[in-house]
Amino acid sequence: MKNALIFTCILLINARTTLSGQEHEAWLQSENYVPNLIRKGITWKTIADSIQQFYPEQQKQLEQVLWAGQLQKKGTPKDTCEVILWQYLSNHDRSFLKQLDEKLLKLGPKAMPSLIAALNIDAATRRIVYRERFEDPIFYQCISDIAMQHLEMETGIYFFRNFAFPLNLFSNAPIEERNVIIKTIQTWYERAQNLNKPEQINLFLTDFPHYKYGSPIYTATNLAKAGDTTNAIFHLKYYYNLWKLPCVSNILIANLIKDLGEDVAMDDCLHRIYDYRCMRESGVDCIWYILKNARADIPYKVLADIVATERYSRMKTNDNQYVWPTIFNEMALTKNLWAVPILVELMRIELPVKGNSINSYYWQQTYPDQFNKLFRVCDFALLKLKELEPDTVPTLNWDKQPERDAVIQQILSSKEVKH
């Protein structure tokens, strides 16, 4: 044990002489200690001895490392899937680990019984998961994590993966949660063995509709990818309605359904956006959905009404609650004549754009000269109207505000503008 600890210390000292200051700090973080030793290919016994010496509080990591060492001592198993899984214990080379992934995928459905059994094996492996940012901790996967990952890839069912928390590890989940997930998978698999892939996914979504782990909505999208669009839409609509609240529509699910060819949120948004008691976020989501999916002029007229009335609502107590600035910002990129009623209503707002907190990124990027000349909301609306309907806006000196004001008043009072 003494020699093992000396070896580990030498490794750390060598690392300190070759790493930059930021890298050195990341190396010494307790979260990175065990993963860094694993990715260097150090023996499991040496890693276990080092944990006991330097981080004895990391009992879970110690148990996982000891388990890995015990599996290696048992020798090569007979089952083909287990043979591959056990190889994750011995080699830290990235290309080798990638080859193991490919071998597991090639086994196909016949590997599923072994993968399900491996969900209970929390032995550490040499697979290291890196984050996008260097300063974020890295972590290693256990055999149970790799088994879950390949089960989900093989079946198209996200039993555990939640897209809101994509870096969660199955090996770190509470034991009660894990037991429920494993039992569910076993129950599903007993009934799904003789079904094709679309039927297997549909069986899971149909018979476990209230399953609270994983990502059922992305499982439903996988059902569409597998060829069953009809049932995919059916399940997505179920979750859309299940999670719908008086002020909130799940626009994420609505967009997934729209990608499959059906619109479920347009009417909801057109009605809900008038409710000024609702939170700004739901209104903004609906604005984006309406502008992306509108196939007639009525949705644009609804947004024009929002611009015209929202500012006078007693339910809006500060500027951060308004959604009309989002409508204004989107108009910078519009080329749709249906947007004219919105532009006309925006012409009634004399608020300067630069220097205010209203959403104006697209205007600033698309019209930097006018933005820096302190154009107001009404001025930008007039400018866009000139692009959409050149004959409606007469020739004027855009640098002179009185001329812009005169044209704006003329348009607002004119009955010739088609709303």
Image (cartoon, rainbow, N blue to C red):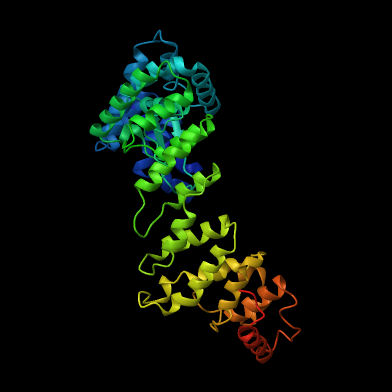
Residue in the foreground of this view, choosing between 404 and 370: 404
Q: Is residue 167 above or below residue 313?
A: above
**Image quadrant assignment for residue 396:** bottom right
Estimate the x, y position of residue 91 in percent, counting from the top left.
47, 22
- Is residue 113 or residue 26 the one in the foreground? 113
Q: Residue furthest bottom?
A: 402
The percent coordinates of residue 78 (x first, y second) are: 40, 7
| x then y, percent, for residue 171 | 33, 31
Q: Quadrant of the N terminus?
A: top left
User: Taking the image as drawn, is residue 318 in sight?
Assistant: yes
216 relative to 114, above or below: below
Q: Residue at x 40, y 31 (%)?
A: 141
Q: Is residue 82 left or right of residue 333?
A: left
- Relative height, residue 144 to residue 111 (above, below): below
- Residue extending furthest top? 78
In this view of the protein, which residue sits in the foreground, 90 or 234?
234
How many marks can you see? 0
Question: What residue appears at the point 62 percent right and 76 percent down from the top-left corner?
Answer: 381
User: In the figure, residue 127 lies in which quadrant?
Assistant: top left
Answer yes or no: is residue 2 visible.
Answer: no
In the image, 212: left or right of 125?
Answer: left
Residue at the extreme front of the image, as rendered: 415
Where the C terminus falls, by quadrant? Answer: bottom right
State the residue in front, 67 or 224: 224
Across and down, in percent, residue 205 comes to 38, 32
* Residue pictured at 38% horizontal, 57% vertical: 248
Q: Is residue 338 left or right of residue 28?
A: right
| Residue 2 placement, left or right of 363 | left
